[in-house]
Amino acid sequence: MISVGFTRPRDRIAEGERVCSEMGFEPFGAPSFDPVRGDREVFEEIEEVLSSGRAYFTLFASITAVEECVDEYGRDRLLALLERTNVACTGSSTEKALKKLVGRDSDLIPEIYSGVGVAEEIADEVAYKTVVLLRSAGGDGKIVEILEKAGAKVLDEPVYDMIPAPICENTIELLDKAASGTLDALLMTSPNSFAVFYGQMVDRFGKGRTDEVLGGTFKVAIGIPTAEAMRKTGVPCDAVAEVSTFEGMLETVRKRFAR
């Protein structure tokens, strides 16, 4: 059986393992981050702007952004707040979460799944309009840069932060599996997830051993930003998922080992 390692936020591990198993892989999942709710003032500002109807677009930059807003406002209240705004999601997984948790469809999913993809697709229609960006505190600012250059007023709202998850039994199992050279594929779901995992590998086994074993492991990046982060570290990915979702990454692994 093909073994697949991955790191995700702690509350996504069970789902990831289930999907891996259903697709016929042996999963080795470990937590990368734990979400921490944003400041109360952030949610108050979001509510005021959405209630006023001034928001032309509201962008959910991740599944976690949807979940944190639902936890803060409740399903019905959030649904009401989104009645007078267009809603964009960075990808199909985020849209599914919005539909499941809020009962609201997205008005836009970019062709290339990412916040930058959304910003580029709406750039020609947002001049002098307000865009509400619901994201992690760890964003790199590129979305805001694109939208402000296009003339939009951007309310950049960090509705949550991600703190590195403590090393646990699952982390050690994944690290040891990778270091043994018997992990067939490694999925990297974000630049920060890769940075945490790579740092843990180096701390435990040293940079030389880490680079050696990862060099022989089929590595899949969920998207271009993650691929670029891996390249800069000196451990480039072997493939970028055609569809930037967890399932899309697994499809990339399936195709690789079906040859």
Image (spheres, grey):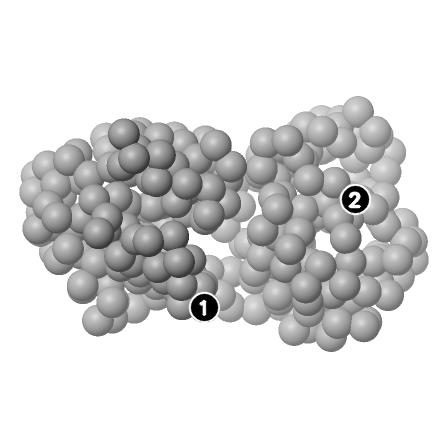
Image location (x, y in percent) of residue 158: 61, 56
Few, some or many residues within 10 Å of mark 1 (<14, 14–19, 20+): few
Q: Is residue 226 left or right of residue 205?
A: right
Counting every numbered tag in the picture gives: 2
Q: Quadrant of residue 12?
A: bottom left
The disc, 2 or 1, on the residue closer to the chain's N-terminal end is 1
Kind of residue sitting beneath label 2:
Asp
Does the rendering let one see residue 206?
A: yes
Q: Quadrant of residue 251?
A: top left
Where does label 2 land, which residue? 107
Few, some or many residues within 10 Å of mark 2 (<14, 14–19, 20+): few
Q: Quadrant of residue 217?
A: top left
Q: Is residue 180 left or right of residue 152?
A: left
Q: Is residue 62 left or right of residue 199?
A: right
Q: Nearer the viewer, residue 66 or 18?
A: 18
Image location (x, y in percent) of residue 24: 33, 53
Does the rendering let one see residue 135?
A: no
Residue at the spot x=23%, y=30% of the render? 234
Residue at the spot x=81%, y=72% of the render? 76
Where does label 1 land, which residue? 11
Q: Is residue 125 above or below residue 181?
A: above
Residue at the spot x=62%, y=65% of the render? 67
Image location (x, y in percent) of residue 97: 63, 59
Q: Is residue 96 left or right of residue 131?
A: left
Q: Is residue 33 above or below residue 134?
A: below
Q: Nearer the viewer, residue 131 or 67?
A: 67
Kind of residue sitting beneath label 1:
Asp
Image location (x, y in percent) of residue 173: 18, 63
